[in-house]
């Protein structure tokens, strides 16, 4: 009997030790993001990952978008920061990849990179070494989101040409309906407005000429487009120069404006805030029949692994999970954002429309081409368009200032 008791006690002690070992073997990853509005989605995805990988837990933390890059850079520079990082793309990626803060990814440690088009991987590639540092998470588009009910109630159809857009805006204003909810007080919104309204007018040839140096931003095509933007700004939100980004969103969500020039990423947010909204999208208007209607597209960022993480193997498992078609399908259909992962199934009609429009696109020019050096093309565009729409500059002056800043480092403009 005593022997039996000893065996049972020994077994219990062994079980306790094994239980403790199992608990100690549990790996907790930290995962940072600026996408506060997507928190519920990521928490659900994390539950699915944890069910598939019972030895790993993920703690998801979000930060305000305007402070995220600074908070992240400070933590990484101090040798800290999260294990898995949602990073931005292009120039913003380079600021944290160049110092060696991120783990290089390849088809050995992340075979799922094969699921992505080359253009998506290029957005997450460091130019100096040609290595990929993040798994891309979204392709975004700048276009016009519109309230279908307001259009239907007023017998209106989405405009195809610029003249149709101006006439439509005038017709709405005559009925005391705000044509656009956009304001310009938040500087970065001015860049999204340019992308949403002027892409077709500028066109792929203009982009090619800018990249090659055959043209610069004093080109008549760019100056003329800025002048058209100034013309249509009379149909923005009342006192638009004082209307910030959240206020412009709320005006549209409340059904008090017919259109919002901005990102495809707005659709899910608008619908979450007001599920009764019936929304549609259309591309920037063309100048004349026969021109190609375009939207401006870019890759929004990716998921990276901290090079100094002590849990790289677990972090890579999570990043690989975020690179699967199953994840891409959930991301696309839940958040109404286009995942660049091949083989996804799009269920949402508006997202299907965005995907169709994206077949004819130009780059979201300043972000894709001119955010690598200072002064950033985005900052130059945002600030000078803001001044122009406030009446402090002419289109010619705004274009000249933008060009002057970029020419300080962009050699094709220095001919």
Image (cartoon, rainbow, N blue to C red):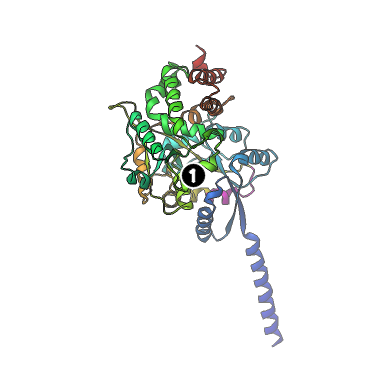
Instruction: Kindly report the secondary structure that dominates the magenta region of the rendered protein.
Output: helix
Q: Is residue 173 left or right of residue 301?
A: left
Q: Please rate how many residues cluster around mark 1, counting C-alpha atoms within 10 Å: few if below 14, some from 14 to 19, many from 20.
A: some
Residue in the picture at 54% in, 42% down? 247
* Name of the residue lying farthest toward the bottom: 1
* Highlighted range, magenta: 308-318
Q: Is residue 170 magenta?
A: no
Residue in the picture at 30% in, 42% down? 155
* Number of marks: 1
Q: Secondary structure at mark 1?
A: helix
Query: x and y percent of residue 302 in the render?
Result: 51, 42
> Observer-nearest residue: 311 or 369?
369
Q: Is residue 37 left or right of residue 144?
A: right
For disc 1, the marked residue is: 251
* Name of the residue lying farthest toward the top: 415
> Observer-nearest residue: 9 or 380?
380
Query: x and y percent of residue 392 in the render?
Result: 55, 23
> Observer-nearest residue: 234 or 94?
234
Residue in the picture at 59% in, 35% down? 97
> Observer-nearest residue: 178 or 402?
178
Query: x and y percent of residue 84 in the render?
Result: 58, 47
Please, is residue 330 above or below residue 74 in the view? below
Residue in the picture at 49% in, 44% down? 251
Q: Is residue 111 visible?
A: no
Q: Is residue 237 visible?
A: yes
Quarter occupied by residue 242: top right
Query: x and y percent of residue 366 in the render?
Result: 50, 28
Please, is residue 130 above or below residue 150 in the view? above
- Where, quadrant-wise, is the N terminus in this rendering? bottom right
Q: Is residue 256 left or right of residue 407?
A: left
């Amino acid at each position: 009997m005593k022997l039996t008791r000893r065996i049972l006690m020994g077994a219990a002690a062994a079980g306790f030790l094994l239980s403790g070992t199992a608990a100690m073997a549990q790996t907790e990853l930290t995962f940072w993001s600026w996408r506060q509005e997507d928190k519920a989605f990521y928490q659900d995805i994390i539950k699915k990952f944890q069910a598939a990988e019972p030895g790993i837990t993920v703690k998801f933390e979000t930060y305000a978008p305007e402070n995220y890059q600074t908070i992240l850079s400070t933590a990484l520079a101090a040798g800290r920061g999260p294990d898995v990082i949602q990073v931005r793309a292009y120039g913003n990626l380079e600021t944290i990849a160049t110092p060696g803060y991120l783990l290089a990814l390849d088809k050995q440690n992340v075979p799922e990179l094969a699921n992505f088009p080359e253009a998506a991987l290029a957005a997450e590639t460091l130019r100096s070494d040609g290595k990929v540092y993040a798994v891309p998470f979204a392709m975004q588009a700048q276009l016009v989101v519109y309230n279908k009910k307001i259009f239907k109630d007023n017998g209106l159809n989405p405009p195809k040409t610029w003249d149709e857009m101006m006439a439509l805006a005038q017709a709405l204003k005559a009925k005391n309906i705000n044509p656009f909810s956009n304001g310009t007080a938040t500087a970065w919104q001015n860049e999204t407005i340019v992308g949403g309204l002027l892409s077709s007018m500028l066109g792929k040839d203009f982009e090619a000429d800018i990249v090659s140096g055959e043209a610069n931003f004093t080109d008549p095509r760019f100056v003329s487009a800025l002048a058209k933007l100034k013309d249509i700004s009379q149909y923005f939100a009342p006192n638009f120069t004082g209307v910030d980004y959240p206020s412009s969103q709320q005006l549209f969500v409340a059904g008090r404006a017919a259109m919002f020039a901005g990102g495809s990423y707005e659709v899910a947010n608008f619908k979450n805030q007001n599920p009764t909204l019936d929304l549609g999208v259309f591309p920037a208007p063309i100048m004349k029949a026969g021109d190609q209607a375009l939207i401006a597209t870019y890759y929004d960022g990716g998921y990276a692994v901290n090079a100094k993480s002590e849990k790289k193997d677990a972090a890579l498992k999570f990043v690989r999970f975020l690179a699967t078609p199953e994840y891409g399908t959930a991301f696309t259909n839940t958040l109404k954002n286009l995942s660049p992962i091949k083989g996804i199934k799009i269920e949402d009609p508006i997202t299907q429309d965005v995907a169709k429009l994206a077949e004819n696109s130009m780059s979201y020019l300043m972000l894709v081409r001119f955010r690598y050096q200072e002064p950033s093309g985005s900052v130059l565009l945002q600030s000078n368009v803001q001044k122009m729409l406030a009446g402090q500059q002419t289109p010619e002056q705004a274009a000249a200032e933008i060009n002057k800043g970029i020419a300080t480092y962009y050699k094709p403009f220095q001919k």
